[in-house]
Image (cartoon, grey):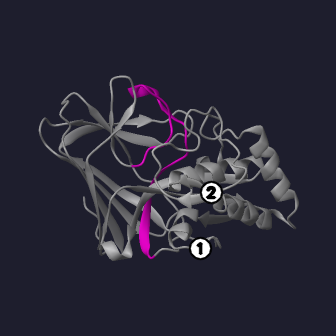
Amino acid sequence: MHTRVTVTVQPNSDTSRRLIVPVGLPTPHQMPVHFEVSGGLYSLAGESTTGQMAAVVRPVSGQQIEIDYTYREGGAGYPDAVFKPGVNRYTRAANDLVEGAIRIAETERDGHAAIQALVNAAAEKFRYAHPDKRFNDGCDEVPYLSCGLTEGSCVDINTYLIASLRAAGFEAGYITGYFFPEEKNGCCDDMHCWVVTRHNGVVLEWDIAHHLKMGTREICCGLNPKPGDRVAVAHSMGLYFPQVGIECEKLIAEPAWISNDGELEKADISIRRQFAGNAVAA
C-alpha cells in the first residue's frame, strides 16, 4: 500500500517569487519513495545544520503548482539528525526552564519515566488554541511557564516540550508533516507536528496537541490519539538554507513563498491524501 499526498499551491501575484518545499522524511511507519513537482521547475537546496534537503521551485507564470509525495508502508526509522540538537532561539531553554526540567526528571525512577513526566508537565502548561501572539515571540530562548494555562498550537506546545526534554539531557526531535483527520476523508488544512524521543535505543512518539483537542491531559506515547493518518515531511527548528537566503527559520512544512529578504510567507494551498496499491508513479 502506498500513500499519495498532493499539495496544490495557488499562484503568487509576484511572479518572481520562489517556493520552498520539503521533500519528505522517513519514519518507522513510512518511507518517501517519490517526489514530483508540476507547474514549475525546481532544484534542491541543502539545510546547513541538519543536512536535510528541500526543493526550491520557480513557478511557470500564472500556473498553480502541484507537489506530489508518495510514501510506502514501513520505513527505516527517523534519521539520526532528528535527535541532534541545534542551538538557536527556538530550541535554547531559559535557565529556569532547565532547572525545572532537571528537577522533574530527577524525581523519577528511570529515564523512560522521566520522559513521560516531562511530557505530562508540558501538557499541563497549555490550552490548545492558535493565538496571535506565541508564548516565545520576541524571546532569544524558550521561557519557563510557571503557572496557569498558556494558549498554544501544536507548534508552541512542542517547542516547549523539546526544550524541556533536551534541558534534562534526553534525545528528542521535532517532526513536521500533515495529519488527515478521519472525518475529513483525505483532506487537511495545514501542517501538523509531533515529537519523538530516543532513550536507551527506544524511540517513542508523542502528540500532546491531539490529546488536548480530545479533552484529555493523560498523555500516552504513540501517534493518532485522534483518529486519522499522517505523513512526515521535515524535521527540526531554526533552519538555514543559505542558497536562498533563509536564516534561522523556525520550521518548514507546507510549501512557502520566499521573499527577497529570505523570509517565508504563507502560500494559498490545498492538501489531499489518497491510498493506492503497490505501483509507484514513474
Q: Counting other residues with Cα less than 10 Å from the Cα at mark 1, is it few (<14), some (14-19), or many (20 or more)?
A: few
Q: Counting other residues with Cα less than 10 Å from the Cα at mark 2, is it few (<14), some (14-19), or many (20 or more)?
A: few
Pick whichever, 96 or 182, lies toward us: 96
Q: Say if the magenta span includes residue 126.
A: no
- Quadrant of residue 7 within the rendered picture: bottom left
Report the label total: 2
Q: Quadrant of the C terminus?
A: bottom left
Q: Which residue is drawn at 36% across and 55% down?
A: 190
Q: Give the range drawn in magenta.
A: 227-253
Q: Quadrant of the N terminus?
A: bottom left
Give coordinates of residue 107: x percent, y percent: 88, 62
Give coordinates of residue 78: x percent, y percent: 56, 57
Q: Residue at x 50, y 68 (%)?
A: 213
Q: In this view, does 271 lie above or below 98?
A: below
Residue 216: numbered disc: 1
Q: Which amino acid does label 1 sit on?
A: Thr
Pick whichever, 19 or 143, lies toward us: 143
Give coordinates of residue 23: x percent, y percent: 39, 49
Where disc 2 sits, the SS reads: loop
Give coordinates of residue 195: x percent, y percent: 59, 58
Q: Name the residue under label 2.
A: 149
Judged left or right of residue 179, residue 269 is left
